[in-house]
Image: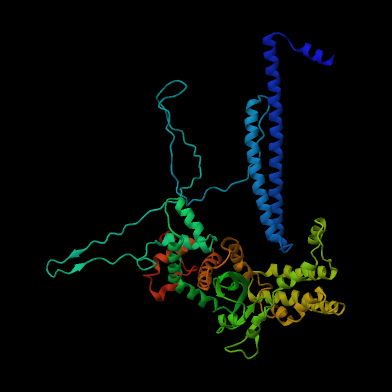
């Protein structure tokens, strides 16, 4: 009965049916547009929330320091999440515009777009003038006067362009003595080479700075119409590393002239017969900025096949000063009394010490494991209190970072010394309550057995609380390991140490490593040896900057 009533309401007239269908279609379009609007609004809101969360996290990190050991990784994850949400919001906005165009009574939702800085002034501008009308479109008059202009800027990129430079050397013979003369061949990094300095700098920076192995680079070059074999490219890399060795030696001398160094090492798989061995890359970082030192920062890398203590002893054989490093036993011989040519003093890393307690007090980590049904370790209140006590020292340090050594020393004597005395007494007391093999006892002993190293910062304003400078410089290696997997040989590891030294030192001095390498490779053959220090990153000026100066 209900079905018959519904059918009877539909008119038999064709015109009326068309009108009814049009009305239904219009209502459907409006509903679709409203739904699209709602989705676009939701996407924009989610993106805005993610953006604000990221800003809050960054501000918290700046104001209060790292709230967790993994905070940098969490920030990176938040940025990745924001990236996807912004893309979703942009896509939904285009959908709602198309839906609103069909629905006359619904206005498309307009979201507040992320703010963008103006395009840099140094980029070249290409003016494309849209032709003006010859006559007035309203009345047809040809008497037009220009009032002004509006400019819309669009960012564009020119794909990488390859070229072959032909250096022509004409031969001449003397008609009197018949001697033939010809200008010398142009310089190439490799004798009888073929690679220009810009190409070679790109090759080296992509391999060691952007972690792109030569086989992947060769694939990209072939797609761009320039087929080059991996062995041919490897030949150029070897020549480039050899040509840059004098710069490496100058950076080495600069680093070993420091009064205080950060030292660390990391694993590097190296190819052996039918397997990979675990080799090591060592880094020594000179960074005087925390105590307002005037000398530029630099990083020095070394490669070794194993982790025996003889390697750091050889690296620092003629050096004396303060070494900030972890508790690796191989450094022990460096701290020996009566060492020649002079003493090296150990400075402990509070970040290492804090990490041992943090892992035992990781409340959030334990909760996550429990929610996944995994076994979680116990959370120890003693570990939590140890983290809080060490964090109080970090709070004091943040206030004096960048001040002179004397100012830092005065603040430490006043504020940090009482906290260190309390920390020592408290750790000793807690150790008496624990069994010798307890995880907490091991974490406490790590500090108490090296207490002179951990408290040395109270007597010297140059010392930092952590060894993070070395860990930051080494971060390029684990990032690269996932891309290149292993070194092909010990010689390959030594080349990596040279190029990592150059690239990381350029980065520490806020210099574009690829532009700097290209200029150095172009000039190093003709540059006087006595003035080679002009090519170091902190003395270097790019050609446009030099011309402007």
Q: Quadrant of residue 173?
A: bottom left
Q: Quadrant of residue 13?
A: top right
Going by the picture, which residue comes out furthest to the left?
176
What is the x, y in percent for residue 377?
82, 66
Going by the picture, which residue comes out furthest to the bottom?
338
Q: In the displayed structure, does residue 377 sit left or right of residue 295?
A: right
Camera-nearest residue between 302 and 324: 302
Name above or below for residue 129 compared with residue 521.
above
Name the colouring of the figure: rainbow
Q: Residue at x 30, y 59 (%)?
A: 167
What is the x, y in percent for residue 152?
51, 39
Camera-nearest residue between 51 and 300: 300
Name above or below for residue 513 compared with residue 339.
above
Viewport quadrant of the C terminus: bottom left
Q: In the displayed structure, does residue 241 sit left or right of residue 384?
A: left
Report the number of numbered marks: 0
Q: Residue at x 62, y 27 (%)?
A: 101
Going by the picture, which residue comes out furthest to the right?
433
Q: In the displayed structure, does residue 485 sit left or right of residue 543?
A: right
What is the x, y in percent for residue 506?
52, 66
Q: Quadrant of residue 90?
A: top right
Going by the picture, which residue comes out furthest to the top?
13
Can the viewer see residue 289 in this picture? Answer: no
Viewport quadrant of the N terminus: top right
Can the viewer see residue 121 in this picture? Answer: yes
Name above or below for residue 165 compared with residue 97.
below
What is the x, y in percent for residue 333?
64, 85
């Amino acid at each position: 009965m209900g079905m018959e009533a519904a059918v009877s309401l539909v008119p038999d007239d064709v015109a009326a049916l068309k009108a009814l269908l049009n009305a239904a279609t219009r209502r459907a379009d409006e509903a679709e547009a409203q739904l699209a609007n709602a989705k676009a609004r939701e996407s924009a809101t989610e993106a805005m929330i993610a953006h604000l969360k990221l800003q809050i996290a960054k501000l918290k990190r700046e104001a209060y320091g790292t709230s967790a050991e993994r905070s940098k990784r969490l920030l990176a994850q938040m940025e990745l999440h924001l990236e996807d949400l912004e893309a979703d919001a942009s896509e939904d906005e285009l959908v709602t515009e198309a839906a609103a165009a069909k629905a006359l009574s619904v206005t498309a939702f307009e979201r507040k777009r992320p703010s963008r800085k103006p395009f840099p002034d140094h980029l070249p501008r290409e003016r494309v003038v849209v032709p003006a009308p010859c006559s007035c479109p309203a009345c047809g008059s040809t008497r037009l006067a220009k009032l002004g202009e509006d400019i819309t800027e669009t960012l564009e990129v020119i794909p990488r362009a390859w070229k072959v430079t032909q250096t022509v050397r004409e031969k001449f013979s003397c008609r009197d003595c018949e001697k033939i003369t010809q200008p010398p061949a142009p310089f190439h990094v490799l004798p009888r080479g073929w690679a220009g300095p810009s190409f070679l700098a790109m090759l080296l920076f992509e391999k060691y700075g952007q972690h792109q192995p030569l086989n992947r680079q060769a694939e990209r070059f072939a797609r761009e119409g320039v087929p080059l074999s991996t062995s041919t490219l490897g030949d150029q890399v070897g020549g480039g590393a050899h040509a840059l060795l004098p710069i490496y030696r100058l950076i080495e001398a600069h680093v070993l002239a420091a009064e205080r160094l950060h030292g660390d090492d990391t694993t590097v798989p190296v190819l052996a017969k039918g397997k990979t061995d675990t080799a090591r890359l060592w880094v020594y970082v000179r960074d005087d900025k925390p105590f307002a030192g005037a000398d530029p920062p630099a990083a020095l890398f070394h490669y070794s096949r194993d982790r025996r203590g003889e390697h750091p002893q050889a690296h620092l054989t003629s050096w004396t000063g303060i070494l900030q490093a972890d508790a690796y036993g191989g450094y022990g011989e460096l701290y020996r009394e009566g060492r020649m040519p002079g003493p090296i003093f150990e400075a402990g890393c509070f970040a290492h010490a804090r990490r041992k307690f943090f892992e035992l007090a990781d409340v959030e980590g334990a909760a996550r494991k429990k929610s996944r049904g995994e076994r979680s370790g116990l959370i120890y209140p003693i570990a939590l209190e140890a983290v809080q006590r060490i964090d109080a020292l970090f709070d004091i340090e943040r206030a004096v970072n960048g001040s002179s050594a004397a100012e830092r020393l005065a603040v430490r004597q006043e504020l940090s010394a009482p906290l260190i005395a309390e920390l020592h007494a408290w750790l000793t007391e807690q150790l008496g309550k624990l069994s010798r093999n307890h995880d907490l006892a091991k974490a406490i002993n790590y500090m108490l057995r090296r207490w002179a190293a951990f408290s040395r910062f109270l007597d010297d304003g140059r010392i930092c609380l952590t060894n993070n400078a070395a860990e930051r410089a080494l971060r390029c290696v684990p990032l690269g390991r996932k891309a290149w997997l292993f070194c092909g040989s010990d010689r390959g590891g030594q080349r990596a140490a040279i190029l990592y030294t150059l690239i990381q030192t350029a980065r520490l001095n806020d210099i574009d490593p690829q532009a700097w390498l290209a200029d150095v490779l172009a000039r190093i053959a003709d540059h006087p040896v006595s003035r080679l220090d002009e090519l170091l990153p902190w003395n270097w000026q790019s050609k446009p900057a030099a011309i402007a100066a």
